[in-house]
Amino acid sequence: MNVFSTISGIRQYRWADHAAMWGLVPTMGYLHEGHLSLVRYAHQENDRVGVSIFVNPIQFNNPNDLTNYPRDLDRDLSILEQAGVDLVWTPSPDVVYPPNYQTFVEVEKVSKVLEGASRPSHFRGVTTVVAKLFNVFQPHRAYFGQKDAQQVVVIKQMIHDLNFNLELITCPTIRETDGLAMSSRNVRLSANARQQATCLYRALTAAKCAFDSGHKKAAELRATMLAIITQANLARIDYISVAHPETLAELEIIENQALLSLAVFIDDVRLIDNMIIGEPCS
Ligand code: AMP
């Protein structure tokens, strides 16, 4: 496995074999099975797999969240080595944003709601760094998790608008056995908070059940999710949403599909999760 912190190192290795098809998995490290599932999908569809590990400071709107974000580069590198990854980029912030850095990428409408409403400038940071990753690696395919559903929508829009010549592959959310979506942030949950954190998945599942049994009004599904989350005494709701899966506009009636999504603080750890319900319109 080849590990570089510089851009020139990545480019040299990336282009050593011009014919190879490359898959890229962008991460912020502290890797878990969710990240590894993306690596496995990338291996299935490409000759070579690259992974980036970079805790991107400009996508954190809360300085404490950035400071407390878990990191363990040695552990991550040994996991990626075992997973057969070819190339890893581990830049420091000044490699990505050198002095006098001035350029940012901002997607408009779809980045302003949900996470974007709660975390102003978050997606500006995400799209800026992902555009740079695409330029540095020039992958044929890039792999992202459905766990961050809005991120997928925003990056798809950026790829379309800026004519990036690659395919975005969305991979399913990997969960713990009790349903909690895997996340690097889960290690920050106390034992009690960890138990209560299952309320997100339980809320989504209950809303899906209500929908499957005929409840098509979005307000009813929001109420179903609210009732479950409020039973958890450590939970503080940031948002509960039933939205169109592409425009992310809040729905009144679900005609075809909907994206159920939640952001909830459990103690002081902010968790997000989501589920798509219904069938795509034919
Ligand atoms: P992160 O390191 O949290 O920025 O995540 C890097 C990539 O892994 C993103 O595309 C995430 O959506 C994806 N990811 C994170 N958690 C999961 C999960 N539980 N299942 C699938 N993909 C995930």
Image (cartoon, helix red, strand yellow):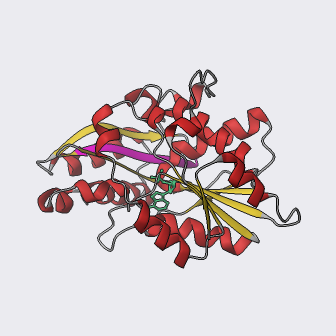
- Report the front residue among 75 and 259: 75
Residue at x-position 71% and y-position 48%: 8
Q: Position of residue 7 (x, y in %)?
A: 67, 46
Q: Residue 235: which quarter of the image?
A: top left
Q: Position of residue 145 (x, y in %)?
A: 53, 57
- Report the front residue among 6 and 160: 6
Q: Residue furthest right?
A: 19
Quadrant containing the N terminus is bottom right
- Left/right placement of residue 271 relative to residue 129 reads left
Relative to 206, is 248 above or below? above
Residue 126 seen anywhere in this rendered image of the structure: no
Task: State how many labels appear.
Answer: 0
* Magenta residues (range): 256-265
Residue 263 seen anywhere in this rendered image of the structure: yes
Q: Is residue 263 magenta?
A: yes
Relative to 77, is 210 above or below? above
Q: Position of residue 95 (x, y in %)?
A: 58, 39
Characterize the magenta stretch by its predominant secondary structure: strand
Residue at x-position 82% and y-position 63%: 16
- Report the front residue among 145 and 50: 50
Q: Position of residue 123 (x, y in %)?
A: 52, 33
- Left/right placement of residue 231 relative to residue 5 reads left
- Left/right placement of residue 236 relative to residue 252 reads left
Q: Is residue 227 magenta?
A: no
Q: Residue 20: which quarter of the image?
A: bottom right
Residue at x-position 88% and y-position 62%: 18
Residue at x-position 58% and y-position 30%: 98
- Left/right placement of residue 133 relative to residue 81 reads right
